Amino acid sequence: MNVAVVGGGIAGMEFVRHAFKLPVKITLIEPKPVMVCQALLPELLSDKVDEGSLCIDIEEFCCKTGVEFVRDRAEYIENGLIITEKGKQVEYDAIVLAVGAEINHYGIEGAERTCNVNTLEATLKTKRELNRAEDVIVVGSGITGVEVALELAEIGFKVCLVEYMDRVLPAFSPKVSNFVYKIMKKDGIDVRTSSAVLKVERDGVVTNKGKIFGDVVIWCAGIKPSNFVERLDVPKEEGWIKVDEFLRAGSAFAIGDCAFVKIDGKIATKTALEAEMQAKHVAENIKRILKEERLARYRIRSSIDKPIAMIMLAKNRAILVYKGITVFRPMKLIYKIKKIAIERFLRSFT
Ligand SMILES: Cc1cc2nc3c(=O)[nH]c(=O)nc-3n(C[C@H](O)[C@H](O)[C@H](O)COP(=O)(O)OP(=O)(O)OC[C@H]3O[C@@H](n4cnc5c(N)ncnc54)[C@H](O)[C@@H]3O)c2cc1C
């Protein structure tokens, strides 16, 4: 059986790690040379980690696991073939879509010119921009926005965090929001909630409450499906690839950020934890297909109503949110646990 994996991020690479011993031929299509652990990108801004420590060389990993690496971007799928940007045609019997997501600027004027930390390249560019900055505006206070704001405050930037909703970390409980809000205030961050960014200008952002001046604007306000996903002829929900309880979308499997996973009324969060679990599950289901067994239902671990997250708060601090329970202390120990978990994950590819 030929299995094609489109996307070599956390989900795609984790799938390969679990599936390479199966009696299948795997082809991984990914334009980048490395898999990036995005969870560490905010700490790259503050030089707590270096580029090398958050990347895994895909070619090396593929060599070791006997997987064919096609270093190219999939453009579209037609008549059972994946066509890449450089014109290569990849045949497959089973396909695993793991293409992640793209930054969402919501069509706001000037927003495409802002910095972000969604990819390694973008984070390195943001770092260069910060060299000439004092005042930084972070737009969006999900986990990424909060982590970026606190990392930058720790290394001496004047940070203003702008959030559209009436509290920071709006996807979490008010208790979590209040706790993190107090930490941000204590660390000197100017937090502006209920503030909608209407326009981005060279010297700051215009909000519904007036202009905020800043040298650099870092966009952490959300993600959307990629153009590749837009072009796919598969079931969709809000533009994402809609999968069933076996993580299938039509004849394909989809995992990670590009998938909309709703099972028994619960919706999976777009997190590394879910990407890893879904990848492992699809490897298991491919094994079942080979053995002509029934597919196994997926069980969501981190859902939107009961998320699992470790939120880093700079200064070696983190908190743990585990399905409605929040562990606020000891923050340094929680931070250490998160770092160990990431290190272990990355080491599993070497
Ligand atoms: C700054 C930041 C911090 C985060 N922190 C955390 C955290 O602390 N904990 C947590 O659980 N989650 C965190 N996340 C979310 C987590 O990183 C993602 O949920 C996870 O990476 C999703 O994995 P994925 O494989 O679906 O997508 P990605 O890891 O983004 O990988 C997608 C891959 O697909 C490739 N690709 C895209 N289009 C194509 C194409 N057409 N053809 C071929 N390849 C393609 C891309 O190049 C990329 O390598 C964070 C995200 C960010 C941005």
Image (tube, rainbow, N blue to C red):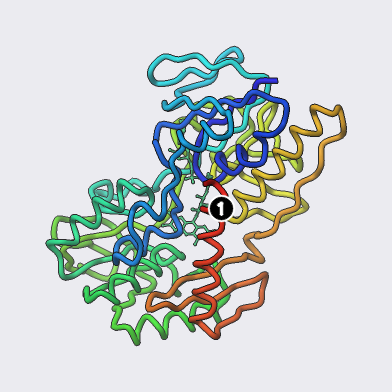
Label tally? 1
Q: Could you tell whether 134 is left or right of 75 in the image? A: left
Front in this rendered view, residue 255 or 17: 17
Residue 300 against residue 187 in the figure, above or below: above
Label 1, residues with CA under 10 Å away: few <14, some 14-19, many ≥20: many
What residue appears at the point 66 percent right and 54 percent down from the top-left corner?
Answer: 267
Front in this rendered view, residue 333 or 234: 333
Q: Could you tell whether 174 is left or right of 316 in the image? A: right
Identity, as a three-letter code, of the amino acid under mark 1? Lys
Pinpoint residue 224: horizontal percent, then vertical percent. Answer: 46, 45
Which residue in the protein does label 1 denote? 270
Q: Could you tell whether 334 is left or right of 31 in the image? A: right
Residue 20 against residue 215 in the figure, above or below: above
Front in this rendered view, residue 181 or 254: 254
What residue appears at the point 78 percent right and 52 percent down from the top-left corner?
Answer: 264
Residue 345 against residue 322 in the figure, above or below: above
Pinpoint residue 251: horizontal percent, then vertical percent. Answer: 69, 26
Q: Quadrant of the N terminus?
A: top right
Q: In which quarter of the image is residue 193?
A: bottom left
What residue appears at the point 50 percent right and 35 percent down from the top-left corner?
Answer: 7
Pinpoint residue 59: horizontal percent, then vertical percent. Answer: 45, 33
Pinpoint residue 109: horizontal percent, then vertical percent. Answer: 25, 49
Residue 265 against residue 278 in the figure, above or below: below
Q: Quadrant of residue 184?
A: bottom left
Distance from mark 1 CB to nearest ligand 1 atom below 8 Å: yes
Q: In which quarter of the image is residue 45?
A: bottom left
Secondary element under disc 1, as helix, strand or loop, is loop
